Amino acid sequence: MTSSKPTSAADQQLIDHAARHGFTITAKQLAGWRAAGLLPGNIPGGGLGQGRGSTSTPAPESFDLVLGLARLAGPGKRPGNRALLLFADGLRVPEASVRAAFRASVDADRLPDEDEVPSDELDLDERLDRLSNQVADSDQRVTLVPARARRIDERIARTLGGPPAELSELDCNTDPPRLTALDATMTALAATLGGSVPLQDIGALLRAMSPGMPAHPFASLVETTRGDVPEAASRVLADDDSLAFLPEGDPRDVLRKLADTAPLEDLAAAWRTAIEVREWALDLCQRVEDELDAGQLGEAVTEWLRGRLFLSGLSVIATLSERWTLSRNAFSALMWLFQCQAFVNLESELPGCQWQLLQIPGLAPPPVRDLILSKVAGPEPVTTIEASS
C-alpha cells in the first residue's frame, strides 16, 4: 500500500484560500495546473533546521490564480484556452503560457496545402498555382458578404432605393473588375504568403464586399493613390503598387514574433479591442435590424451605410464570417497589433500623417480607432472631426 505525498504548507494555504471563497481544490489539482503552466511554483524559503526540511510560500499571484482556475475547473478546457481566459481577466498567468497560447492561434491558421507536401522549395507563383487548383476543387472560399449582412443590405436598399447618383461621380474607376469568391480567396492567399497585394487588388476586394454598390468612392481612392499623391506614394508603394512599409513574406511570421515579444499590456489591449470590435459589430447589426423592423431608419442605418462605404464595415463582415473562439480572438488581437505596427512604420516614413482622419465616422470601428491612435498619436489629443449627417 502506497501513501500519498503529504500536502505542503504552501499548497495548504492555497487550498484554504480557495475554500474561504467557496471552492474545493486539491493538491493534485494544484500540481496539474503547475504542470500545464497555469500556476507558478511555490517560492522556496529557508530551512526549518534540525532536519525538519524547508519552507516555501505561494507566489503572490497564486492566490488570485487558484480562484480563477477553480472557476474554470472541469473537463474539455484546454490549457491554452484557460491561459487566455485568465489573462483576459487580468490575472498574472505565467507569461510563457500566455505567449504560447497567442502563438498557437497563429499556428492554427493554416493554408489548405500546409498539411500535405512541404512547400519550402516552391516559389510564390508555384505555391499560388498549387493552392489555386486545391481551392478550385474544394468549397474553401472567402465569404464576401455573409448572409446576415446581405439581408440587411437588401432590406435597406428596398427601403431607400439605390445609392445617390452623386456617389458615382466620386468613383474614378468606370469599369472596375468584379471578383468572384475564388478570385477573392486567391487574393487573400497571395497576401498571406507574400505580405501584401497591389492597391488595385485591394480596391477590387473592397468592391467585391459591397456588390450592391454601383460605385465605391473609397475603393477608388485606394486605386488612384499613386496618381493622387505621387510624392508620398513613391515613398510607401513598391513598383507593383503594393504597400512597401509592410514586411515581406508570410505575415504569420510577424504575428508569431508579436506573440513572443509584444509587451503583455499591448497583448491585453489588443485582446480587449478584438472583443469590443465583435461586440460593436453584432450590436450594430441588431440596431439596424431593429430600425428596419420598426420602419424608422435612423442612426444605426446611417452608421451601417457609412461602414459599407469605408473600412469599419469590413470588421462587420469579418465578425459575421467567422465562428468566434478564444483562439480566433487571440489571432484577431495579433492582427490589430500587426496593423498598429504597420501604421507606426508608415508614420516613420511619412511623418505627420493625418491620423485625425480616423475620427471620421465609419472609417474604422471605434475600438480600433482608439487602439491605433494610442500607438501612432501617443498621449497628445487628436482633433475630432465632426461628420455631417
Image (cartoon, grey):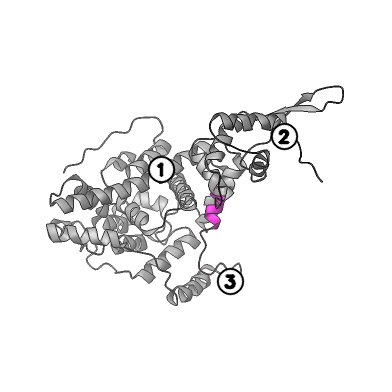
For mark 1, what is the residue? 273
User: Please, which residue is most extreme toward the top here?
Assistant: 49
* Residue 241 pos. (x, y %): 39, 59
Q: Give percent across and percent down for residue 127.
A: 52, 70
Occupied quadrant, residue 387: top left
- Residue 173 colored magenta? no
Q: Amino acid at mark 3?
A: Glu
Sooner in the amino-acid sequence: mark 2 or mark 3: 2
Residue 381 image-quadrant placement: top left
Task: Decide: few, some or many residues near mark 2? Use Cα within 10 Å; few <14, some 14-19, many ≥20.
Answer: few
**The residue tagged with tag 2: helix, strand or loop?**
loop
- Disc 2 from disc 3: Cα separation: 49 Å
x then y, percent, for residue 360: 26, 43
Amino acid of disc 1: Thr
Q: CA distance from mark 3 to mark 1?
A: 35 Å
x and y, in percent, of residue 38 in the image: 61, 41
Q: Nearer the viewer, mark 2 or mark 1?
A: 2
| Residue beneath disc 2 | 7
Q: Which residue is mark 3?
A: 116
Closer to the chain start, of discs 3 and 1, is: 3
